[in-house]
Image: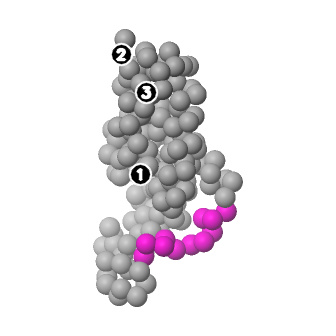
């Protein structure tokens, strides 16, 4: 019996073995959506519990597990955003305003430009560029067609370029 079959049968250790390699990409996705490390950790933890409960109903193959789990993470992150209003806080705590280097300013400008994108566009960029997923998986995680995912990524990049100027990217 492989791990997926064992997980479907209720083996929690098998679920842990299946999810363990997906935790880093899941955290990075949640962080790109929520923009707070603590909130991203909470979203991934909630997603793991959701996956544990849902895996008996999972009908795909092991290769389909990553997009399935990242979809759960995306949904948990979006739910957390709707429940909490901390995103109004503004600046990323990691930026040091007193540093004075051009890199910090550029990072701040990029962070602000990313923050002004819609959640769907920010998620598409994170999946494609940050997690380096193939466009087919980006589409599956977002629940849209591959051409729609490609278009969403293209439009998001175009908006970032227009907000930051060509030399900013």
Q: Which residue corresponds to the image point at 47% horizontal and 31% vertical from the top-left?
A: 68
Q: From mark 1 to mark 3, how far is it between C-alphas?
A: 23 Å
Q: Is residue 59 above or below residue 114?
A: above
Q: Indicate the position of residue 23 as horizontal and vertical percent values.
A: 41, 42
Q: Which residue is mark 3?
A: 13
Q: From mark 3 to mark 2, how far is it between C-alphas?
A: 12 Å
Q: Which residue corresponds to the image point at 54% horizontal and 48% vertical from the top-left?
A: 43
**Looking at the figure, which quarter contains the N terminus?**
top left
Say which element carries label 1.
helix
Q: Rate crowding at label 2 as few (under 14), some (14 to 19) or many (20 or more) other CA atoms within 10 Å.
A: few
Say which element carries label 3.
helix
Q: Which mark is nearer the camera, 1 or 2? A: 2
Q: Quadrant of residue 6?
A: top left
**Looking at the figure, which quarter contains the C terminus?**
bottom left
Q: Rate crowding at label 1 as few (under 14), some (14 to 19) or many (20 or more) other CA atoms within 10 Å.
A: many
Q: Which residue corresponds to the image point at 56% horizontal and 72% vertical from the top-left?
A: 90
Mark 1 or 2, nearer chain start: 2
Q: Which mark is nearer the camera, 3 or 2? A: 3
Number of the label disc, if any, that sits on residue 2: 2
Number of the label disc, if any, that sits on residue 28: 1
Q: Indicate the position of residue 42 as horizontal and vertical percent values.
A: 55, 50
Q: Which residue corresponds to the image point at 55% horizontal and 56% vertical from the top-left?
A: 39
Q: Indicate the position of residue 76 as horizontal and vertical percent values.
A: 58, 44
């Amino acid at each position: 019996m492989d791990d997926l079959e064992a997980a479907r049968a209720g083996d929690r250790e098998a679920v842990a073995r299946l999810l363990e390699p997906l935790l880093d990409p899941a955290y990075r996705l949640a962080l790109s959506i929520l923009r707070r490390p603590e909130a991203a950790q909470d979203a991934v933890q909630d997603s793991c519990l959701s996956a544990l409960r849902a895996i008996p109903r999972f009908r795909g193959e092991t290769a389909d597990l990553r997009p399935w789990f990242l979809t759960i993470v995306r949904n948990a992150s979006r739910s957390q955003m709707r429940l909490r209003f901390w995103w109004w806080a503004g600046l990323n705590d990691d930026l040091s305003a007193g540093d004075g280097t051009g890199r910090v300013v550029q990072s701040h400008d990029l962070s602000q430009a990313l923050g002004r994108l819609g959640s769907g566009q920010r998620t598409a960029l994170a999946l494609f560029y940050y997690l380096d997923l193939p466009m087919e998986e980006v589409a599956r995680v977002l629940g849209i067609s591959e051409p729609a995912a490609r278009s969403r990524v293209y439009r998001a990049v175009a908006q970032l370029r227009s907000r930051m100027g060509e030399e900013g990217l």
